[in-house]
């Protein structure tokens, strides 16, 4: 169900910040739950979509109109922001972790080891992307 509500500019701006904050909170909780369940082998990965699955969802959102498409785009952007801040080498969160470690030990991390950790992190991210994309393709052909 979609409802259009007329709001003043200031009220719409305020509501947008509230909705963004709620979205960030819910995405963070959802991602934390997914990762914790994945660690113990109980994650429902059928709810995870990669680039192929997202393209299909964009089409579905576009069918509902411009507002739904823009809302979906905002949700994807918030998801990417949260994921990018995870403390995984090769992501910005990994770089922030390195900076924090360097601040604590008061010397730079050996660039060779930092490079190796980033390479491992990147390889794991690519493996995850392949697995998720494979699941997206299997899901498409099984429907």
Image (spheres, rainbow, N blue to C red):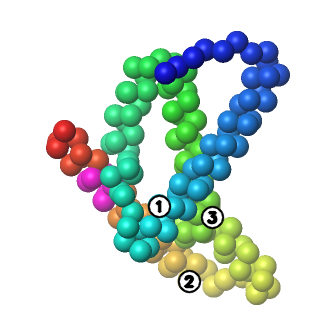
What is the x, y in percent for residue 11?
Answer: 80, 22
Q: Which label is found at residue 45?
A: none
In the rendered view, tell whether residue 87 sits above or below residue 15.
below
Of the numbered discs 1 and 3, the one sitting upstream in the chain is 1
* In-image side of 131 versus 3 (left or right): left
Q: Is residue 34 magenta?
A: no
**Depth check, front residue: 55 or 92:** 55
Instruction: Give the number of the mark in front: 2 or 3.
Output: 3
Question: Percent position (x, y) of residue 44?
Answer: 36, 58
In x, y percent, where is residue 30? 53, 54
Circle nearer the N terminus (2, 3): 3
Say if mark 1 contacts mark 2, CB within 8 Å: no
- Number of marks in the image? 3
In 3D space, how far apart are the residues under numbered discs 1 and 2 (Cα atoms)? Answer: 29 Å
Residue 38 seen anywhere in this rendered image of the structure? yes
Assess whether residue 131 is covered by the magenta stretch.
Answer: yes
Quadrant housing residue 86: bottom right
Neighbour tally class for label 3: few under 14, some 14-19, many 20 plus, Cα within 10 Å? some
Residue that appears at 35% across and 57% down:
45
Q: Indicate which label's residue lies in the foreground, 1 or 2.
A: 1
Q: Quadrant of the C terminus?
A: top left
Residue pointed to by mark 1 = 34
From which residue to which does the magenta span run? 130-135
Residue with the mark numbered 3: 93
Q: Residue furthest front?
A: 1
102 with respect to 124 (left or right): right
Q: Secondary structure at mark 2?
A: helix
Closer to the eye: label 1 or 3: 1
Look at the numbered disc 1 and give the secondary structure of its residue: helix
């Amino acid at each position: 169900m979609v409802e259009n509500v007329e709001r003043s500019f200031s009220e719409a701006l305020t509501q947008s910040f509230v909705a963004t904050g709620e979205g960030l909170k819910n995405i963070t909780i959802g991602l934390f739950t997914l990762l914790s369940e994945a660690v113990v082998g109980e994650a429902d990965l059928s709810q995870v979509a990669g680039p192929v699955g997202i393209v299909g969802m964009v089409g579905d959102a576009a069918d509902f109109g411009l507002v739904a498409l823009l809302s979906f785009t905002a949700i994807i952007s918030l998801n990417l922001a949260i994921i990018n801040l995870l403390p995984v080498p090769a992501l910005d969160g990994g770089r922030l972790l390195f900076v924090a470690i360097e601040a604590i030990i008061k010397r730079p991390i050996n660039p060779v080891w930092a490079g190796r950790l980033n390479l491992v992190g990147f390889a794991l991210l690519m493996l995850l992307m392949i697995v998720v994309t494979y699941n997206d393709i299997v899901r498409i052909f099984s429907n």
